[in-house]
Image (cartoon, helix red, strand yellow):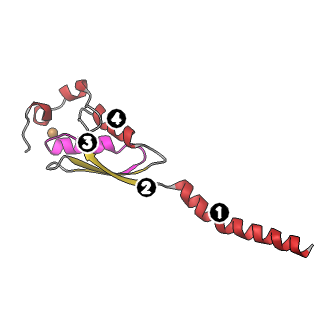
Amino acid sequence: MKTKIYFTYLVLVSVIIATPSLAQKKTKKIVTAEFTVKGVCKMCKERIENAALIKGVKFAEWDKQTNKLKVVFNSQKTTLDKIHKSIADAGHDTDKLKGNDGAYKKLPKCCAYRDGAKKH
Ligand SMILES: [Cu+2]
């Protein structure tokens, strides 16, 4: 009888110890990624970063010189594919997806990265 109680106690204690670490694994999975997005100017930067900041994305920073976009996101709330899609919908090419043509045509002339717009 005593052994049984002791065993139950052991099981309970190990469950209590294991619970917080399990909960931690479940709640957040923060991922950092970097990929190329075509663009030329400050307006592009704003447009690209806004498009990248969909639900689940904590941070987005695009570099005009290197055309690299750095994102930090929660992989349980969104995916890298969704971020690419949102940027492509805004009219910008990424290294995975071609920007939406209709949206590209609506970009200001200074942002026409496919048609030789220069960095400024
Ligand atoms: Cu631009």
What span is in magenta?
37-59
Tell me if label 1 and label 2 are in contact, CB under 8 Å.
no
Q: Secondary structure at mark 3?
A: helix
**For mark 3, what is the residue?**
48
Q: Nearer the viewer, mark 2 or mark 3?
A: 2
Query: In the shown orientation, is residue 89 left or right of residue 9?
Result: left
Please tell me which of labels 3 and 4 falls first in the chain: 3
Can you tell me whether the CB of the residue at mark 4 lies under 8 Å from the nearest atom of ligand 1?
no
Badge 3 amino acid:
Ile
| Tag 4–tag 2 contact (CB < 8 Å) | no
The reply to whether discs 3 and 4 touch (Cβ–Cβ < 8 Å) is no
Q: How many marks?
A: 4
Quick check: is 100 in the magenta stretch? no
| Image position, residue 58 (x, y; %) | 38, 52
Question: Does 115 sit above or below residue 39?
Answer: above
Residue indicated by mark 2: 30
Q: Position of residue 64 (x, y in %)?
A: 16, 48
C-alpha span from label 1 to label 3: 40 Å
Residue 38 in the magenta stretch? The answer is: yes
Q: In the drawing, does residue 85 fall left or right of residue 41?
A: right
Q: Amino acid at mark 1?
A: Thr
The amino acid sitting under disc 4 is: Lys
Residue lying at the far top of the rendered structure: 102
Q: Which residue is mark 4?
A: 85
Name the disc covering residue 19, or none.
1
